[in-house]
Image (spheres, rainbow, N blue to C red):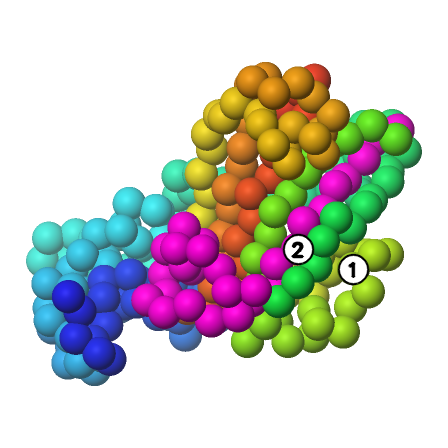
Amino acid sequence: MTAPGRLTWTDIRNRIQSRILNRTYAPGDRLPRDEDLALELGCARATVHRAMQDLAQSGLVERKRKGGTHVRAHPVTRATFDIPITRREVEQRGSRYGYQLVSRAIEAPPPSVMARFGIPRSAPMLHVKALHLADNRPYIYEDRWIDTGSAPEILEIDLTTQSANEWLVHNKPYSRVDVRFYAIKAEGEIASQLAIASGEALLIIERTTWIGDRPITTVQSATAPGYQLASQG
C-alpha cells in the first residue's frame, strides 16, 4: 500500500507531462537527471525511471544511454483521440441535432468510477446522464461523472439546454485523456434510451480527461447501432 502523501509513478509522470505541456520543459530541452527529479519530488529514483519510460513510450520524450532525457522537438504520437462536440459531429453528418438531459444529481461515485479517477476515497460528484439525437433518433447515450472540485462552474450551468460535453470542451481544455474501447450487450437503461433490443451489440467508449494532475470528468458513451463506425463518442 502506498504511504499517505507518497507519490506514485503516475503522479510523477503527470507532473513531468504538465511541465512539458506548459513549456517549463520546452521542445529540445534536456530534462533533469532521474536522480535529481527524485530528490526534488521526494520519491525513489525507480519511480522517476518508470514515469520516464511511460513518457518515452507515449512519444513525448526521448531517452538515450549516457545522453540523458530530452523533450522531443517533434513529439511522436502513439495514439491520438480528439474529443468532439457531439452537436457539431451530428451537424457535420448533415443531420439535425437534438439533446435531452436524462438525469442530473450529486452522488457518491461507485468503485469503478473512483478507480478511473484514481482516488482512494469516495467524494460526492456531479452525475449526468444525457441522450444526443440525430434527426430525432438516438445517437449517443452518455453516463458522465464530473469532479466539481475541478470544475465548480458546472453546477451553475443549465444542463437542460447545453450538454456537459459541449461545456467541458469549450471551458475546460484537457492536458491528458485516457481512452478505452469495448463492446457490451445492450440491456436495461442503455437499451431503453437508445431504443434498441436487449442483447444487441454496442460499442462503448470510456474516456477520462485530466487538467494537469487532476481528473475532471469520466464518461461512458454508448453509440447507437448504425452510427458506431462514424462516431468517436
Quarter of the image where one finds residue 171: bottom right
Local packing at callout 2 (Cα closer than 10 Å; few below 14, some 14-19, many 20+) is: many
Q: Which residue is mark 1?
A: 159
At 66% from the left and 63% from the top, the residue drawn is 105
| Left/right of residue 164 with respect to residue 13 in the rendered view | right
Please state the extent of the stretch shown in magenta in the rendering: 107-135
| Viewer-closest of 74 and 179 | 179
Dot 1 amino acid type: Leu
The Cα atoms of the two marked residues, 1 and 2, are separated by 9 Å
Quarter of the image where one finds residue 161: bottom right
Local packing at callout 1 (Cα closer than 10 Å; few below 14, some 14-19, many 20+) is: many
Instruction: Assess whether residue 126 is covered by the magenta stretch.
Output: yes
Contact flag, marks 1 and 2 (Cβ < 8 Å): yes
The correct choice, above or below, for 118 with respect to 184 in the image is below
At 69% from the left and 21% from the top, the residue drawn is 196
| Left/right of residue 68 with respect to residue 212 in the rendered view | left
The mark found on residue 128 in the picture is: 2
At 78% from the left and 50% from the top, the residue drawn is 101
Q: Helix, strand, or loop for circle 2?
A: strand
At 61% from the left and 20% from the top, the residue drawn is 198
| Left/right of residue 200 with respect to residue 5 in the rendered view | right
**Which x, y percent locates residue 158?**
82, 65
For marks 1 and 2, the one nearer the N-term is 2
Screen quadrant of the C terminus? top right
| Viewer-closest of 96 and 13 | 96
**Which x, y percent locates residue 190?**
63, 33
Instruction: Assess whether residue 69 is covered by the magenta stretch.
Output: no
